[in-house]
């Protein structure tokens, strides 16, 4: 009877050791998977950061070009408006001069 209990205990201990070993393997596998996930996550974040930096640089360049074009256009429009204002003043002066002569001769 003692021998069979001893055998049973030995089997139980062996089974528990095997179970413990498989649990350790499972924990190692989970750690490895977690590390891989963290590395992949870091790579993704780095790629995302680089993408956003490139996109931001491209948008800054685009906005700079648009602002320069707008500045040129508005400068030209303002110059044309100024020229138009001067021409309008000259035309008004000429019309008033003609009216003054017509009023003076009548």
Image: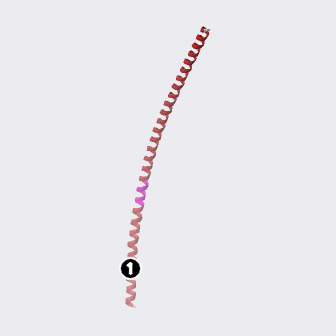
Residue 58 sits inside the magenta stretch? no
Residue at 41% in and 71% down: 84
Residue at 40% in and 85% down: 99
Relative to residue 57, is residue 44 depicted above or below? above
Q: Please, which residue is most extreme toward the front here?
A: 1
Residue 68 sits inside the magenta stretch? yes
Query: Is 32 situated left or right of 86 in this image?
Result: right
User: Along the line of sight, which residue is nearer the eye, 60 or 98?
Assistant: 60
The x, y position of residue 36, in whole percent, is: 50, 30
What secondary structure is marked by label 1? helix
Relative to residue 84, is residue 70 depicted above or below? above
Residue at 60% in and 9% down: 2
* Magenta stretch prevailing secondary structure: helix
Look at the image and tell me in which quarter the N terminus lies.
top right
Question: Dot 1: few (<14), some (14–19), or many (≥20) neighbours within 10 Å?
Answer: few
Q: How is the image coloured?
A: secondary structure
User: Along the line of sight, which residue is nearer the eye, 69 or 4?
Assistant: 4
Report the number of discs: 1
Look at the image and tell me in which quarter the C terminus lies.
bottom left
- Res 94 quadrant in image: bottom left
The x, y position of residue 13, in whole percent, is: 56, 16
User: Along the line of sight, which residue is nearer the eye, 31 or 36?
Assistant: 31
The x, y position of residue 60, in whole percent, is: 42, 50
Residue at 50% in and 28% down: 31
The x, y position of residue 77, in whole percent, is: 42, 64
Relative to residue 45, is residue 71 depicted above or below? below
Quickly name the residue at label 1.
94
- Residues drawn in magenta: 65-73
């Amino acid at each position: 009877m003692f021998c069979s209990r001893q055998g049973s205990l030995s089997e139980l201990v062996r089974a528990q050791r095997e179970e413990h070993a498989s649990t350790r393997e499972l924990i190692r596998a989970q750690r490895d998977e977690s590390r891989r996930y963290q590395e992949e996550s870091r790579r993704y974040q780095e790629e995302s950061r680089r993408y956003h930096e490139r996109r931001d640089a491209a948008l800054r360049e685009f906005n700079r070009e648009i602002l320069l074009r707008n500045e040129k256009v508005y400068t030209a429009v303002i110059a044309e408006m100024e020229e138009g204002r001067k021409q309008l003043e000259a035309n008004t002066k000429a019309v008033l001069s003609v009216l003054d002569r017509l009023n003076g001769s009548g």
